[in-house]
Image (cartoon, helix red, strand yellow):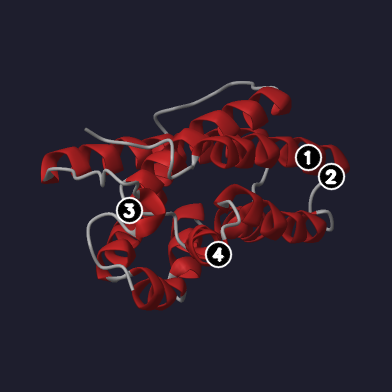
Amino acid sequence: MATDLNPPAFTTAATPRYSRLEDAQGLFISTVQCALGIHLLRMAGLVTGGTAGLALVIAYGTGWSFGAVFFVINLPFYGIAWARKGRVFAIKSFVSVAAVSALADAMAPYVTIAHIHPGAAAVLFGVVAGAGLLGLFRHASSLGGVSIIAVIVQDRFGIRAGWVQLGFDACLFVASAFVLEPMQVAWSLLGALVLNGVIAMNHRRDWYVAA
């Protein structure tokens, strides 16, 4: 069980260490990026994978707040994170999910977009949120749910977290096809592919060395 600042999934022979200010800044920037990516998805009526995608589908269908749904859905996963990745990872994931939940809803009245092509929204989401997730992973955090499981599977079996998330995402997109229009599902799939590609190509222990 990893209980230090940076679990084994985020380390190399030269283990990165952050000051509290560096850690807080990294987590803040990463959660803002993730929240912005989700906001772009909502502007185009798209979904994504994992618990964020499930929360979006529920929010579209019920009119409930995305932030509230996203926060509640992730609650059961923190026990798994605490047991398998340690106290620090679980607490940081909880804080990150709470921050993204609040920021995604808070952005709505301040970041208004009259029109955005769903293809542009999908690609921008994948790039922005992918970079945000990388930042969270590298600061020993996650966005809960599937992200936690994906990182655990990577640690245990060596399967990259991005590919693990992609498998979970496929199941959600099959379900979303019963709620969204076919083209919305297609554009949403593009966004998920871009996001998971960013993670799969860049979330590697042997590339990340902090001096």
CB of mark 2 within 8 Å of CB of mark 1?
yes
| Distance from Cα at disc 4 to Cα at disc 1 | 30 Å
Nearer the camera: disc 3 or disc 2: 3
Nearer the camera: disc 1 or disc 3: 3
Q: Earlier in the sequence, mark 4 or mark 1?
A: 4
Query: Which residue appears at 76% of the width and 55% of the height?
Result: 170
| Distance from Cα at disc 3 to Cα at disc 2 | 37 Å
User: At label 4, which amino acid type do we have?
Assistant: Val
Q: Earlier in the sequence, mark 1 or mark 3?
A: 3
| Distance from Cα at disc 2 to Cα at disc 4 | 33 Å
| Distance from Cα at disc 2 to Cα at disc 1 | 5 Å
User: At label 1, which amino acid type do we have?
Assistant: Gln
Q: Which residue is mark 4?
A: 153
Q: Which residue is mark 2?
A: 181
Q: Earlier in the sequence, mark 2 or mark 4?
A: 4
Q: Earlier in the sequence, mark 4 or mark 3?
A: 3
Secondary structure beneath disc 4? helix
Q: Estimate how packed mark 1 is, as few (under 14), some (14 to 19) or many (20 or more) residues with alpha carbons within 10 Å.
A: many
Label drawn at residue 184: 1
Residue 31, image x, y percentages: 36, 42
Q: Which residue is mark 3?
A: 140
Query: Which residue appears at 12% of the width and 40% of the height?
Result: 21
Secondary structure beneath disc 3? loop
